[in-house]
Image (cartoon, rainbow, N blue to C red):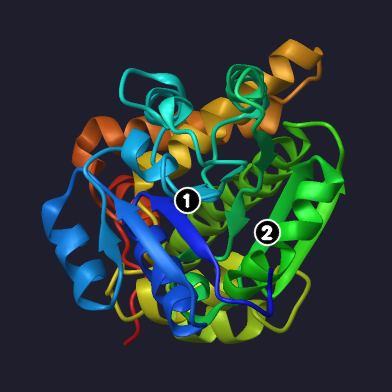
Amino acid sequence: MSGNRATIGFVGLGAMGAPMVDRLIDAGHRLLVHDVDTTAVERAVARGAVAMPSPAALADAAPVVFVSLPTPDVVRQVALGVGGLVEGAAMRIYADLSTTGARVAQDVAAGLATRGVAVLDAPVSGGAAGAKAGTLSVMASGDRAAFDQVRGLLETIGRNTIHVGEGVGQGQTLKLVNNLIAATVWAATAEAMVMGAKAGLDPAVMHAVVAKSSGRSFSTEVFMPKAVLERSFDFGFRLELMRKDVRLALAEAEALGTTMLTCTTAKQLYDHALAQGGEGQDVTSLIRLLECWGGAEVAAR
């Protein structure tokens, strides 16, 4: 499928979905799209996509359907609800690029199996910038034959595309592990940088040293240089979505019976940030709460 023009359905044209659609269009594929945001749909149509009135109509015309949606409840509704993808007759492969958690992925797979649809949960990592550049990591699990059929399409949006297992939900679990690490490290990084600023250290100097020392991480390499030090707070991933991923991960951990003391504490920090008006803000804005508490700003001088 990677070398031929494919007809692809795509539901969800947000910060991640829209650039992924752009890349698939640029690769020569025919995109059928749907989103509740009419402006996002109009933009995709201007790029060459075809608008569909509902998920059901989309799945009635596209053999391969991707979804990139914000929450597990929305994924479940789009896939299995009234007017959902399950009502379409053409869809044979469904790949969920969202972060939903293993249990929702398994529920959707069970619902679509009744229609003979092969399901892949294929969450992505790398942010909006990675989606635009096609450098995302794609963690796909599910039927290997279905993965092989759409691998070329996934590699168009994700340079690091890996089949992590046959069991639906394994990709979701790996994505939650990744995001739980990222969220917890970012919380610790933000706290430590505020501490250093409060002690009188130049934040830019702190960053330069830490970025080349044992404290380096995605947070110091990507979040700090522009989004924080230059105060743009524009990494491209909303604070509430990171908190959502942390909560999903901790729910999975509880179901597995594993202890998550450090990550649970980090979740409380994200809860506080959202309670203080953080909804809609970039994940990098988490540091503002800590700056307020600590009385110091982590900004380039």
Q: Which residue is located at x 27 percent, y 74 percent?
A: 232
Q: Which residue is located at x 52 percent, y 86 percent?
A: 205
List the residue tagged with mark 2: 138
Q: What is the quadrant of residue 157 in the picture?
A: bottom right
Position of residue 135 in the picture relative to residue 32 (left or right): right
Q: Nearer the viewer, mark 1 or mark 2?
A: 1
Q: Earlier in the sequence, mark 1 or mark 2?
A: 1
Amino acid type of the residue that numbered disc 1 sits on in the rendered structure: Ala
106 in relation to 197, above or below: above
Element type where label 1 sits in the image: loop
Please tell me how crowded label 2 is: few (under 14), some (14-19), or many (20+) other residues with Cα within 10 Å.
many
131 or 223: which is nearer to us?
A: 131
List the residue tagged with mark 1: 62
The x and y percentages for residue 239 are 36, 46
Position of residue 138 in the picture relative to residue 245 (left or right): right
The x and y percentages for residue 173 are 72, 35
221 in relation to 74, above or below: below
